[in-house]
Image (cartoon, grey):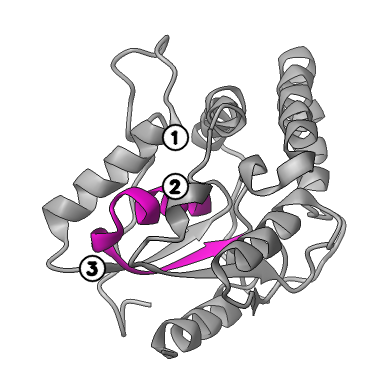
Amino acid sequence: MTDDFTVLTYDRRGLSRSTLDDRERPVTMADHTDDAHRLLAHVADGPALMLGCSFGAVIGLHLAARYGERLDTLIAHEPVAPWLLDSEADAHRRELAELQSLFAAGGLPAALPAIAASVGIDPADADVEPDLTPQPMDERRRTDFAHFITAEFTAVRTDPGCRERLGDTTTRVLPAVGRTTPTTVFDHQAAHRLSSLIGRPVVTFPGGHNGNTTHPRAWAAQLRTTLHTP
């Protein structure tokens, strides 16, 4: 992507190199939104193009709703946003709480397969591009997953959402789903509810919920096409 764009990535608050001063204080979706806003205010010279996947898509939606001037375009790929789901929202909040309980009782070996199933990922499916860079489950990734499940799932469950403000944003918001993500899982449904809410069609990307890691070359090609299409 760096051949065509200036690319910025960052470690969310509490992940990897972004350490917490107070680990007892919950990190809210508002905190994550403010972090992204401050980062763009510091480094960007104009409205940015943002790709948000899963949790990142929810941050992007809040950013578009609160600070629309910071974003030209947001691709919101399968946002894990129960607040987009109307009557089903509470059921999916309970699902996230149950996954947290599973992790508390059995750690990552118990939680990760259930989390994968909840977003429609089949670990036995070998549909990946060849010659991928290995992603071993090292200590840093284990620590990040633990924070993701314990802290960030709570941020998702308690997030009031921003539906009422999305209609007024100046950001071009593009809902997106993975081609192989089952239509029955809540991240796929959330993207389609977002599409109905803002009146924009859903863009389909290669692979499933984690298609950016299983099909990075095809994803980059689709991303370029999407960002360059008015």
Place residue 142 in its image quadrant: top right
Q: Residue furthest top?
A: 24
Q: Is residue 223 above or below residue 158?
A: below
Q: Give left or right: position of 197 versus 228.
A: right
Give the magenta part as a residue range. Answer: 56-77
**Residue at mark 1 to residue at mark 3: CA–CA distance:** 21 Å
Pointer 2 with pointer 3, Cβ within 8 A? no
SS category of the residue bearing label 2: helix
* Disc 2 to disc 1, C-alpha distance: 7 Å
Identify the residue under disc 3. 47
197 vs 124, left or right, is: left
Decide which of tag 2 and tag 3 comes sooner along the chain: 3
Foreground: 170 or 117?
170
Task: Give the labeled residue for mark 2.
Answer: 59
Left or right: 92 with respect to 40?
A: right
Please tell me which residue is depicted at 36% across the width and 43% down the height of the picture. 11
Identify the residue under disc 1. 29
Q: Quadrant of the C terminus?
A: bottom left
Q: CB under 8 Å between callouts 1 and 3? A: no
List x then y, in percent, for residue 166.
45, 56
| Residue under the image location 71 percent in, 31 percent down | 93
Can residue 9 be seen here?
A: yes
Q: Is residue 29 above or below residue 86?
A: above
Quick one: quadrant of the N terminus? bottom left
**Magenta segment, prevailing SS (helix, strand or loop):** helix
